[in-house]
Amino acid sequence: MRIRNLIGGILYLKNEQMKSDQELVGQANAEEGKYQQVVDQAAEQEDGSETEQIYQIFDKVFKKLITLSIKAVVNLINGLFGTDYPLDSEVTYNWTEFEDDRLRRILADTILTINGTHSYHLEAQMEKDNSIVFRVFDYGFHHASRTRVMDAEQGKYVLRFPEPVIIYLYYEGNVPDYYTLTLEKNDGTLMCEYKVPVVKLPEISVEELNARKMVVLLPFHVLKCRRLIKKGAITDASELKRIVENDIIGNINRNVELGNIEQEDAFKLKRYLKSLCRYLGKHHKELEAMRDMTDESFMTDADIICETYEKKLAEKDEKLAEKNEELADTYEKLAEKDKKLVKKEEQMAKQSAMIEQLQQQIEQLKKQQA
């Protein structure tokens, strides 16, 4: 019975390992589908102009990328605002919604709060917009209103705005280094100036992105290719391929090695980079080569998946081997006990036979005496 139970235990452990392997494969497939759908769904939308569709696609990707690991997001905040938050800081997302002129519910720009105290407002742009400072102020005001400080006894009333930044992922022409909104009274008396700094991503090199650890923004570096082609700095597909494989994918891998992002972050960055390349190659003739290069260039994604899950499987195999050793030791001990039990049972059988024989002899003596 004990041996049967041991065999059942071994079969149970092997069955659990097979279930775990299937779950890991399922997770990989789910991630693959989820990452690809985000941009594909946006690209299929037909309601609106091409400019609006482009904005929606890159806006969705931007919001996905700034929800990577805490480490990646904190590095981005430190790089954008010159702060020095620890990489294990608490990050809170203050998502809000509003309705646009066409009564569609849209996520407002991202406001992050670090360690429950300091908030930062990230606004991503794809083209020059001189009215953007009004929108940033509006979002900031609503956030400040929700977190207002009111101390009637001390006569203290405070609206604390998040620190804003406008990130131009791509633009043509000139954009300012700052947008300044002036708040005045009716008579023109100055109340205050609301300044919003501008980050011009096309003017930032990959080396600077690495130095500032703003790895989250690396996929948008493909937009720089469009500008370089228009200037004549890129003339063939091999140069596009070099930028994608070396400047972007290569630096994503290096940042994993440096510990600036997690391995899972790298997978997601490459997945969205692949989607952006496909979209740009489909909708912009000068970037058509990007559409064809993606399958070959992103073969490393499969390597990442295999490496991650093989490591998990190896750990499970190691634990299973330890369990098997323990079971083997237990089986050996039980086998020894079974041998002893067999000997005891034999001894008890002999003793029972002797007792029975003695009882028979006693009965015979009683009959003789009678």
Image (cartoon, rainbow, N blue to C red):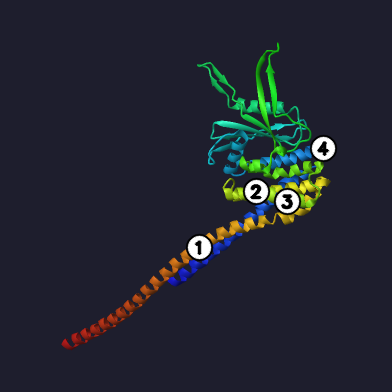
Q: Dot 3 lies on which element?
A: helix
Q: Are marks 3 and 1 in contact (CB under 8 Å)?
A: no
Q: Are marks 4 and 3 in contact (CB under 8 Å)?
A: no
**For the residues marked 1 and 2, what is the alpha-carbon distance in whole angstroms?**
33 Å
Residue 49: mark in rendering: 4
Q: Is residue 1 visible?
A: no
Q: Residues within 10 Å of mark 1 (few under 14, many from 20)?
A: few
Who is closer to the viewer here, 216 or 247? 247
For the point 21% across and 84% down, the residue is 362
Pointer 4 or 3: first along the chain:
4
Q: Is residue 352 visible?
A: yes
**For the residues marked 3 and 1, what is the alpha-carbon distance in whole angstroms?**
41 Å
Q: Residues within 10 Å of mark 3 (few under 14, many from 20)?
A: some
Q: Are marks 1 and 2 in contact (CB under 8 Å)?
A: no
What residue does disc 1 label? 318
What residue does disc 3 label? 242
**How far from the left and from the top, in percent, is residue 193?**
66, 21
Is residue 25 left or right of 7 when viewed as pictured? Answer: right
